[in-house]
Image: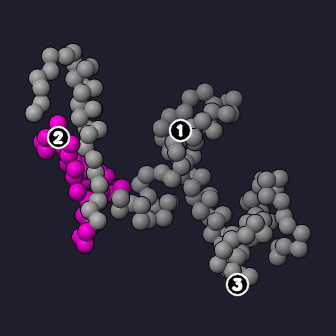
Amino acid sequence: KKKACNSPPEEKEKEVVRAENFVIISKKMSQDSKPEKKVLADVEDDDIDEEEVKEVEADEEDTKLPYSKRKGTALPRASVKRIMKLDDEIKQINKEGTTLVEKAAVLFLEKFAQDSFAKAQTRGAKMIRYEDVADARVSDPNLLFLEGVIPSVPGGSS
């Protein structure tokens, strides 16, 4: 049972957050494999935010899509923001800016990986080797900026 709280509003908000943290979403390992709500003893069913449950379920469905099609992001936002702040000209970064850079980075990496895999397939392989990555970089003039990071391999296909 819940106890009455005579705390200031800030403390009540903290208690609500703590209560929400007790709600654990997990999947059944059964045939239907539908998400199941597990509730700890001190949290009542009325406290479960159904919208939040739907968001978690949507995120689980989202993980089946390629990264570029997902609603969330594949890269940690804090890491992207930290890298962006390395530029002395950048003073403030808003959430939308970080999200845009995350999405651009994911799209770039997906295309680069696809091009590298295409190079691997031309030699009949199913796995990408460094030579495939280097050949993909050499064959795309837009990737010239990576020349110092990914040098071409002597005897490469390009």
Inspect the image, locate mark 2, and give the three-letter code of the amino acid beneath it: Ala
Report the residue at 26% width, 19% height from top: 10
- Residues at discs 3 and 2 in contact (Cβ within 8 Å): no
Q: Is residue 38 found inside the magenta-colored segment of the image? A: yes
Pinpoint residue 119: horizontal percent, then vertical percent: 71, 75
Q: Is mark 3 on a helix, strand or loop?
A: loop
Q: Distance between the residues labelled 3 and 1?
A: 39 Å
Sequence-wise, the earlier of marks 3 and 1 is 1
Q: Can you tell which of label 3 and label 2 is closer to the viewer? A: 2
- Asked whether the viewer can see residue 144, the reply is no
Image position of 148 (left or right of 10): right
- Asked whether the viewer can see residue 132, the reply is yes
Inspect the image, locate mark 1, and give the three-letter code of the amino acid beneath it: Ala
Q: In this view, does 50 lie above or below 139?
A: above
Report the residue at 46% width, 61% height from top: 69
Q: Quadrant of residue 118?
A: bottom right
How many tags in the picture?
A: 3
Image position of 38 (left or right of 103): left
Inspect the image, locate mark 3, and give the three-letter code of the amino acid beneath it: Gly
Residue placed farthest to the bottom in the image? 124
Identify residue for label 1. Answer: 78
Q: Is mark 1 on a helix, strand or loop?
A: helix
Identify residue for label 3. Answer: 124
Identify residue for label 2. Answer: 41
Q: In which quarter of the image is the C terminus?
A: bottom right
Q: Distance between the residues labelled 3 and 2?
A: 57 Å
